[in-house]
Image (spheres, rainbow, N blue to C red):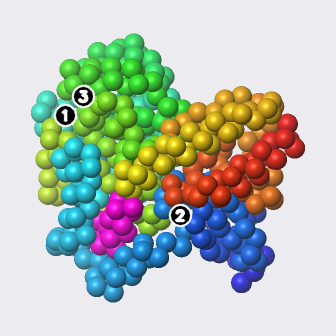
Amino acid sequence: MNSQQIKELYAENVMETYARFDVVLDRGEGATLYSPEGKAYVDFTSGIGVNSIGYGNRGWAEAIMNQAVRLQHVSNLYYTEPGARLAEALTKGTGMKKAFFSNSGAESNEGAIKLARKYARDKYGPGRESVITLERSFHGRTITTLAATGQDVFHQHFFPFTEGFRHIPANDFAALEAELGRGDVCAVMMELVQGEGGVLPLDKEYVSKAFTLCREKDVLLICDEVQTGIGRTGSLFAFQQFDIQPDVVTFAKGIAGGLPMGGILANHRCAGVLTAGTHATTFGGNPVCAAAALYVLDTLTPQLLENVTHKGEYIRKTIESWSTPAVSQVRGMGLMIGVSLKGIKPADVVGRCIEKGLLVLTAGSDALRLLPPLTISHEETEKGLALLKSVLEELQ
Ligand SMILES: *Cc1c(COP(=O)(O)O)cnc(C)c1O
């Protein structure tokens, strides 16, 4: 099918829940995607932080194929090897105690919230159900994770939302102290670099003080690493660069290199909270997804993670060096990069980039978000940056 035919089938048959760009994608190689007609796009999005090891990776595809012909799925009432090995790789790589596997970021966060509420209820009885999250956060699209999300635009249409969520400004320690002082809180949930909200890294000092305060109050600290995790910021998880050991970490996007998978890691204090019958999911830890994830984790060597840091610095410095007045700030960690724009709309930049053969994302109302595959080559990086520069100069 050509691009036009595909778009027409969508228009007739697919719910219009996405403001899709005028791009049809058919295949990929490295960090480059192609339309059915062969138009090339340098990919600075990775399917929103998912395709951590790029496209056309034969080793990854073979790991999936080998597992698929051996055993594609069994119920979680039985044991399988890929899930066991993946949980071990994740606990060893993080110092966390145990893992639970799910299928998406929102589902992982829901599970973490259930875990936190049960932790407090088991220990203190009712009365500690509240969860504190940050303004400008994003935690998912289910009714509960929308309630957790600290952006008013998400709190429409679907009333009633789940009760028990309060949002406070990021990096405001006094606000956190006040909320925890009320004695009704079971958990604080935060993204260490807010992704959808604008690529906003939290202050290290704030995070470290929040961690200490949570410990004092026996409130669980949940790090939503759905976007920041799995090498994106230059370490396996972003918390490893914040000198804290969270009680719960959630992940999804990048874990399986493009197959749907997510999960929860819990430390020794709360790894036993979710007991048989209290939490489950049919596909969680699916052997094919787990095999793909094991391949991704094997690929994320210390050398590759160091490269992620260097590539991120290179991209940030390069954009900072442009004399265009359209850029007001460049920020981020590793290959999670935010570019604040001045005088031009992010959506216009995205549209013009598409015409020229570059995919970029927006974040918040005034920023571009760059999430290239962690394996992007120097050549593809240079090509993408040159395209972005030409678009910004044209629109400035
Ligand atoms: C994408 C994202 C989610 C939601 O993940 P889904 O897989 O779309 O449910 C949750 N939290 C953060 C930080 C995210 O970036």
Q: Is 48 displayed left or right of 299 in the figure?
A: right
**Residue 205 spot, x, y in % from top left:** 39, 20
Please state the extent of the stretch shown in magenta in the rendering: 285-299
Dot 3 corresponds to which residue? Answer: 219
Dot 1 corresponds to which residue? Answer: 120
Dot 2 corresponds to which residue? Answer: 54
Residue drawn at x 80%, y 33% is: 324
Q: Is mark 2 within 8 Å of ligand 1?
A: no
Tag in front: 3 or 1: 3
- Rendered position, 382 above or below 245: below
From the image, give the main secondary structure of the stretch colored magenta. Answer: helix
- Of callouts 3 and 1, the N-terminal one: 1
Q: Is 285 displayed left or right of 340 in the figure?
A: left
Q: Is residue 337 visible?
A: no
Quote the CA–CA distance across marks 3 and 1: 8 Å
Tag in front: 1 or 2: 2
- Indicate yes or no whether the magenta region holds residue 197: no
Name the amino acid type tagged 1.
Ala
Residue drawn at x 27%, y 53% is: 90
